[in-house]
Image (cartoon, grey):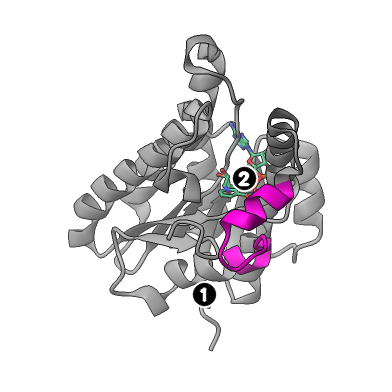
Amino acid sequence: MQKLEGKICVVTGGAGSLGSAAARLFIEQGASVTLVDRDRVALRHIVSTLPVDRAEMFVADVSQSADVEACIRHSLARFGSIDVLFCNAGNFGTVEPIATYPDDVFEAVMAVHVRGAYLFAKHASPHMKAGSSIVITSSVAAMRGDAGVYAYITAKHAQVGLMRCLAKELAPRGVRVNTIHPGPIDNGFQLAVEKGLGAAIGRDGTAFFNELIPLGRHGSAEEVARSVLYLACDDSSFVTGTTLMVDGGMSV
Ligand SMILES: NC(=O)c1ccc[n+]([C@@H]2O[C@H](COP(=O)([O-])OP(=O)(O)OC[C@H]3O[C@@H](n4cnc5c(N)ncnc54)[C@H](O)[C@@H]3O)[C@@H](O)[C@H]2O)c1
């Protein structure tokens, strides 16, 4: 028996590394998926590698209410229900001292991670039945502070607050809500962070992170996807309101 047999999923950031890996695994496990992203070209490419009858694409800016409403309407029209919502789109912003941190960057990062997850939960949850699951991609960054990482770390903490409120409100309806917290992953998003950090600290940014991770390496998108699958499917049927670390022990 596949773990998401006949289930309908919406995955934001679906053109990216973690979103596309999760969408692929969900489909392998029997689901149909609407992949959402603002990057039309990358999204079209990813969807072209997935079975045409089980993958739908929708171009949207997750921070825009009208886009999110339209996306949910579109997915419902195509597949008829929503059983799994994976709020995963993300951007990083910049690393700067507080006195000079750019306000527009702070707002842009909060808009994607926090308002984006809030809007998707707002518009999708009324359509989700008992047994459904919402997963929000936070980060190991939600468990720590680092000088200069104001937008990203604040946004990743805020997603936990959002998740906890949703978990309480939706529990009586049998809808579960959790956050997943990847540590550094071997992909382009993290590499960009490490290049910036490496230049700032004058040493290799990837090696710097590996020393912080007890397992001594970065994770893969597929390892994160398997943990998202756990939260998405009935294997985690008594799990709600939790923060699942997938970080090689970095937060310990
Ligand atoms: N890569 C890591 O090491 C790591 C670690 C912890 C958490 N995360 C989180 O995982 C999530 C996915 O990141 P990833 O590593 O796959 O990076 P990625 O850059 O490959 O994917 C992010 C996707 O989000 C999309 N996106 C950004 N802003 C958007 C918007 N306004 N509307 C719609 N789509 C938008 C991008 O186009 C991109 O396709 C993010 O929330 C990120 O913060 C990543």
The structure residue drawn at horizontal position 48% and vertical position 17%, both measured from the top left corner, is: 98
Q: Eyeballing the image, is 130 above or below 106? A: below
> 169 or 95, which lies in front?
95
> 179 or 126, which lies in front?
179
Q: Is residue 38 visible?
A: yes
Kindly identify which numbered label has been placed on residue 4.
1
Q: Amino acid at mark 2?
A: Gly
Q: Is label 2 in a helix, a strand or a loop?
A: loop
Q: Amino acid at mark 1?
A: Leu
Kindly identify which numbered label has been placed on residue 110.
none
- Figure quadrant of residue 210: bottom right
Q: Which residues, given as a range, are shown in magenta?
A: 206-224
Q: Residue furthest bottom?
A: 1
The structure residue drawn at horizontal position 58% and vertical position 63%, both measured from the top left corner, is: 224
The structure residue drawn at horizontal position 43% and vertical position 67%, both measured from the top left corner, is: 231
> 146 or 182, which lies in front?
146
Left or right of residue 36, residue 194 in this image: right
